[in-house]
Amino acid sequence: MEVKLSNFGRIGVLMGGPSSEREISLKSGKAVFEALKQMGLDVTAIDIKTDNIEENTDLIKSNNINCAFIAMHGRFGEDGTIQEILENLKLPYTGSGVFASKLAMDKIESRKILEKNGLKVPGYIEIDKTSYNTNSKIKNSFGFPLVIKPATHGSSVGLSIIERDGELDNAISLAFTFDQRVIIEEYIRGRELTVGILDSEALPVIEIVPKKMFFDFEAKYKPGMTDYIVPAELEESITKKTMEAALSVHKLWLFKG
Protein backbone atom coordinates (compact mmCIF):
# COMPACT_ATOMS: atom_id res chain seq x y z
CA MET A 1 0.00 0.00 0.00
CA GLU A 2 1.39 3.37 -1.01
CA VAL A 3 1.51 5.96 1.79
CA LYS A 4 1.13 9.61 0.82
CA LEU A 5 3.79 11.85 2.37
CA SER A 6 1.10 14.37 3.30
CA ASN A 7 -0.51 11.76 5.58
CA PHE A 8 2.25 12.26 8.14
CA GLY A 9 1.40 15.92 8.66
CA ARG A 10 4.04 17.92 10.52
CA ILE A 11 6.76 15.67 11.97
CA GLY A 12 8.75 16.70 15.02
CA VAL A 13 12.20 15.13 15.35
CA LEU A 14 12.93 15.03 19.07
CA MET A 15 16.65 15.14 19.81
CA GLY A 16 19.18 16.09 22.46
CA GLY A 17 17.79 15.40 25.90
CA PRO A 18 19.35 15.77 29.36
CA SER A 19 21.23 12.44 29.46
CA SER A 20 24.93 11.69 29.14
CA GLU A 21 24.20 10.73 25.52
CA ARG A 22 22.93 14.19 24.51
CA GLU A 23 25.63 14.98 21.95
CA ILE A 24 25.15 11.68 20.14
CA SER A 25 21.40 12.22 20.13
CA LEU A 26 21.84 15.65 18.52
CA LYS A 27 23.86 14.05 15.72
CA SER A 28 21.26 11.31 15.27
CA GLY A 29 18.43 13.84 15.27
CA LYS A 30 20.07 16.11 12.72
CA ALA A 31 20.66 13.15 10.40
CA VAL A 32 17.01 12.08 10.70
CA PHE A 33 15.83 15.66 10.19
CA GLU A 34 17.86 16.07 7.00
CA ALA A 35 16.72 12.71 5.62
CA LEU A 36 13.04 13.49 6.19
CA LYS A 37 13.47 16.99 4.79
CA GLN A 38 15.06 15.61 1.61
CA MET A 39 12.01 13.38 1.19
CA GLY A 40 9.87 16.49 0.99
CA LEU A 41 8.18 16.00 4.35
CA ASP A 42 7.04 18.79 6.64
CA VAL A 43 9.55 18.37 9.47
CA THR A 44 10.85 20.41 12.38
CA ALA A 45 13.73 19.77 14.79
CA ILE A 46 12.90 19.94 18.51
CA ASP A 47 15.84 20.13 20.93
CA ILE A 48 14.87 18.67 24.31
CA LYS A 49 17.16 20.39 26.82
CA THR A 50 15.76 19.58 30.28
CA ASP A 51 13.95 16.79 32.10
CA ASN A 52 11.12 19.10 33.17
CA ILE A 53 7.86 17.47 32.11
CA GLU A 54 5.81 20.68 31.87
CA GLU A 55 8.49 22.59 29.94
CA ASN A 56 8.85 19.80 27.41
CA THR A 57 5.10 19.39 27.08
CA ASP A 58 4.79 23.10 26.29
CA LEU A 59 7.75 22.94 23.88
CA ILE A 60 6.27 20.08 21.90
CA LYS A 61 2.82 21.68 21.82
CA SER A 62 4.29 24.98 20.58
CA ASN A 63 5.71 23.24 17.50
CA ASN A 64 2.23 22.14 16.36
CA ILE A 65 3.35 18.68 15.26
CA ASN A 66 1.15 15.76 14.20
CA CYS A 67 3.60 12.99 15.06
CA ALA A 68 7.07 12.56 16.57
CA PHE A 69 10.25 10.81 15.47
CA ILE A 70 12.19 10.11 18.68
CA ALA A 71 15.94 10.41 18.05
CA MET A 72 16.86 10.66 21.73
CA HIS A 73 19.26 8.34 23.56
CA GLY A 74 19.42 7.28 27.18
CA ARG A 75 17.56 8.72 30.15
CA PHE A 76 14.39 10.65 29.37
CA GLY A 77 14.49 9.64 25.70
CA GLU A 78 14.50 5.85 25.84
CA ASP A 79 13.15 5.13 29.31
CA GLY A 80 9.47 5.84 28.70
CA THR A 81 9.46 9.45 29.89
CA ILE A 82 9.23 11.28 26.57
CA GLN A 83 6.93 8.52 25.37
CA GLU A 84 4.52 9.26 28.22
CA ILE A 85 4.54 12.98 27.38
CA LEU A 86 3.63 12.16 23.79
CA GLU A 87 0.93 9.71 24.92
CA ASN A 88 -0.63 12.42 27.06
CA LEU A 89 -0.56 14.77 24.07
CA LYS A 90 -2.16 12.02 21.97
CA LEU A 91 0.67 12.23 19.43
CA PRO A 92 1.81 9.09 17.58
CA TYR A 93 5.56 8.43 17.81
CA THR A 94 8.25 6.03 16.66
CA GLY A 95 9.54 3.15 18.75
CA SER A 96 8.17 1.23 21.69
CA GLY A 97 5.54 2.36 24.16
CA VAL A 98 5.94 3.72 27.68
CA PHE A 99 6.25 0.50 29.67
CA ALA A 100 8.32 -1.40 27.11
CA SER A 101 10.76 1.53 26.82
CA LYS A 102 11.11 1.82 30.59
CA LEU A 103 11.65 -1.89 31.01
CA ALA A 104 14.15 -2.31 28.17
CA MET A 105 16.26 0.57 29.50
CA ASP A 106 16.56 -1.03 32.94
CA LYS A 107 19.17 -3.77 32.65
CA ILE A 108 18.35 -5.24 36.06
CA GLU A 109 14.56 -5.35 35.88
CA SER A 110 14.59 -6.58 32.28
CA ARG A 111 16.92 -9.45 33.21
CA LYS A 112 14.62 -10.49 36.03
CA ILE A 113 11.66 -10.71 33.67
CA LEU A 114 13.67 -12.58 31.03
CA GLU A 115 14.83 -15.10 33.63
CA LYS A 116 11.31 -15.54 34.96
CA ASN A 117 10.12 -16.37 31.46
CA GLY A 118 12.81 -18.94 30.72
CA LEU A 119 15.12 -16.82 28.54
CA LYS A 120 18.85 -17.04 29.09
CA VAL A 121 20.80 -14.08 30.52
CA PRO A 122 24.38 -13.75 31.79
CA GLY A 123 24.91 -14.29 35.50
CA TYR A 124 24.81 -10.99 37.36
CA ILE A 125 24.89 -9.18 40.71
CA GLU A 126 23.09 -5.92 41.38
CA ILE A 127 24.39 -3.32 43.83
CA ASP A 128 22.89 -0.07 45.09
CA LYS A 129 24.82 3.12 45.80
CA THR A 130 23.00 3.72 49.10
CA SER A 131 24.17 0.44 50.60
CA TYR A 132 27.52 -0.08 48.86
CA ASN A 133 30.90 0.99 50.21
CA THR A 134 34.44 0.14 49.22
CA ASN A 135 34.68 -2.31 52.13
CA SER A 136 31.75 -4.29 50.79
CA LYS A 137 32.67 -7.82 49.81
CA ILE A 138 31.38 -8.70 46.37
CA LYS A 139 30.94 -12.44 46.03
CA ASN A 140 32.28 -13.16 42.55
CA SER A 141 31.30 -16.65 41.45
CA PHE A 142 31.80 -15.81 37.77
CA GLY A 143 35.56 -15.40 37.66
CA PHE A 144 37.16 -12.87 35.31
CA PRO A 145 36.70 -10.89 33.13
CA LEU A 146 33.70 -9.11 34.64
CA VAL A 147 31.47 -6.49 33.04
CA ILE A 148 30.50 -3.50 35.22
CA LYS A 149 27.88 -1.02 34.02
CA PRO A 150 25.20 1.43 35.12
CA ALA A 151 21.74 -0.14 35.29
CA THR A 152 19.88 2.38 33.15
CA HIS A 153 22.30 3.92 30.64
CA GLY A 154 23.02 3.09 27.01
CA SER A 155 25.84 3.62 24.50
CA SER A 156 28.27 1.78 26.84
CA VAL A 157 28.51 4.92 29.00
CA GLY A 158 30.18 4.09 32.32
CA LEU A 159 30.91 0.51 31.25
CA SER A 160 34.12 -1.33 32.20
CA ILE A 161 35.46 -4.80 31.50
CA ILE A 162 37.91 -5.79 34.20
CA GLU A 163 40.45 -8.59 34.37
CA ARG A 164 41.29 -8.69 38.09
CA ASP A 165 39.84 -8.03 41.53
CA GLY A 166 41.97 -4.92 42.07
CA GLU A 167 40.11 -3.12 39.28
CA LEU A 168 36.65 -3.71 40.75
CA ASP A 169 36.30 -0.65 43.02
CA ASN A 170 37.29 1.84 40.32
CA ALA A 171 34.92 0.25 37.81
CA ILE A 172 32.03 0.36 40.29
CA SER A 173 32.82 3.98 41.21
CA LEU A 174 32.78 4.94 37.52
CA ALA A 175 29.41 3.26 36.99
CA PHE A 176 27.99 4.97 40.09
CA THR A 177 28.81 8.39 38.61
CA PHE A 178 26.05 7.69 36.08
CA ASP A 179 23.49 5.71 38.07
CA GLN A 180 22.31 4.82 41.58
CA ARG A 181 22.28 1.14 40.64
CA VAL A 182 25.04 -0.91 39.04
CA ILE A 183 25.11 -4.37 37.52
CA ILE A 184 28.12 -6.69 37.76
CA GLU A 185 27.87 -9.30 35.03
CA GLU A 186 29.77 -12.35 33.90
CA TYR A 187 31.70 -11.85 30.68
CA ILE A 188 30.60 -14.13 27.85
CA ARG A 189 33.09 -14.65 25.05
CA GLY A 190 31.69 -14.93 21.56
CA ARG A 191 30.35 -13.08 18.55
CA GLU A 192 28.02 -10.11 19.02
CA LEU A 193 24.73 -10.37 17.17
CA THR A 194 21.72 -8.08 17.03
CA VAL A 195 18.26 -8.47 15.54
CA GLY A 196 15.79 -5.68 14.85
CA ILE A 197 12.04 -6.22 14.98
CA LEU A 198 9.65 -4.49 12.58
CA ASP A 199 5.89 -5.07 12.60
CA SER A 200 6.43 -8.05 14.91
CA GLU A 201 8.76 -9.73 12.41
CA ALA A 202 12.45 -10.40 12.99
CA LEU A 203 14.80 -8.66 10.55
CA PRO A 204 18.03 -10.31 9.33
CA VAL A 205 20.68 -11.02 11.96
CA ILE A 206 23.51 -8.46 12.06
CA GLU A 207 26.95 -9.31 13.37
CA ILE A 208 28.78 -6.45 15.11
CA VAL A 209 32.57 -6.62 14.77
CA PRO A 210 34.28 -3.79 16.68
CA LYS A 211 37.93 -3.02 16.10
CA LYS A 212 38.44 -2.62 19.83
CA MET A 213 38.09 -5.09 22.70
CA PHE A 214 34.35 -4.53 22.82
CA PHE A 215 31.55 -2.44 21.34
CA ASP A 216 32.19 0.67 23.46
CA PHE A 217 31.13 4.29 22.94
CA GLU A 218 33.88 5.01 20.41
CA ALA A 219 33.23 1.79 18.49
CA LYS A 220 29.53 2.63 18.33
CA TYR A 221 29.83 6.18 17.06
CA LYS A 222 33.23 6.79 15.45
CA PRO A 223 33.16 5.99 11.72
CA GLY A 224 35.32 3.04 10.72
CA MET A 225 35.66 1.60 14.23
CA THR A 226 33.15 -1.23 13.69
CA ASP A 227 32.16 -3.51 10.84
CA TYR A 228 28.53 -4.63 10.48
CA ILE A 229 27.96 -7.89 8.61
CA VAL A 230 24.44 -8.13 7.15
CA PRO A 231 23.24 -10.81 7.16
CA ALA A 232 25.55 -12.42 9.70
CA GLU A 233 27.43 -15.42 8.36
CA LEU A 234 25.93 -18.13 10.56
CA GLU A 235 24.69 -21.67 10.27
CA GLU A 236 21.02 -21.67 9.35
CA SER A 237 20.06 -23.25 12.68
CA ILE A 238 21.89 -20.53 14.64
CA THR A 239 20.28 -17.80 12.54
CA LYS A 240 16.86 -19.27 13.26
CA LYS A 241 17.50 -19.55 17.00
CA THR A 242 18.82 -15.99 17.18
CA MET A 243 15.81 -14.55 15.39
CA GLU A 244 13.42 -16.61 17.51
CA ALA A 245 15.07 -15.40 20.72
CA ALA A 246 14.84 -11.75 19.63
CA LEU A 247 11.19 -12.15 18.67
CA SER A 248 10.42 -13.86 22.00
CA VAL A 249 11.81 -10.88 23.91
CA HIS A 250 9.89 -8.46 21.70
CA LYS A 251 6.61 -10.29 22.27
CA LEU A 252 7.28 -10.51 25.98
CA TRP A 253 7.79 -6.73 26.14
CA LEU A 254 4.57 -6.20 24.17
CA PHE A 255 2.68 -8.45 26.59
CA LYS A 256 4.16 -6.68 29.61
CA GLY A 257 3.35 -3.29 28.09
Image (spheres, rainbow, N blue to C red):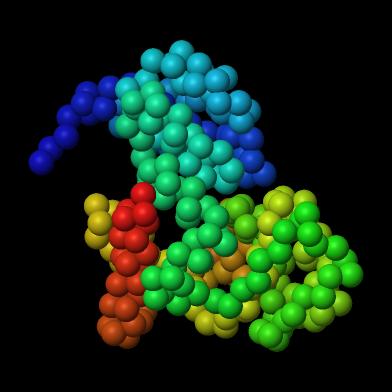
Could you tell whether 11 is left or right of 49 in the image? Answer: left
Residue pushed farthest right? 135
Front-most of residues 45 and 163: 163
Residue at 31% x, 55% y is 255
Q: Measured along the vertical axis of the image, is residue 25 above or below residue 184?
A: above
User: Residue 224, how many percent across, how many down?
Assistant: 56, 60
Residue 119, image x, y percentages: 41, 74
Tell me the quarter of the picture where residue 7 sits. top left
Q: Is residue 160 above or below residue 146?
A: above
At 28% across and 22% down in the image, what residue appears? Answer: 9
Q: Nearer the viewer, residue 219 or 247?
A: 247
Res. 43 visible in picture: no
Image vertical order of residue 70 relative to residue 63, above or below: below
- Residue 22 falls left or right of residue 97: right
Q: Position of residue 68 (x, y in %)?
A: 38, 30
Apparent side of residue 221 relative to residue 5 in the rendered image (left or right): right
Q: Hey, which quadrant is residue 151 in on the image?
A: bottom right
What residue is drawn where x is 28% and y is 77%?
Answer: 240
Write down the quadrant of residue 184 in the picture: bottom right
Rendering coords of residue 105 (x, y %): 52, 53
Residue in the picture at 78% in, 65% down: 171
On the question of residue 216 being in view, the answer is: yes
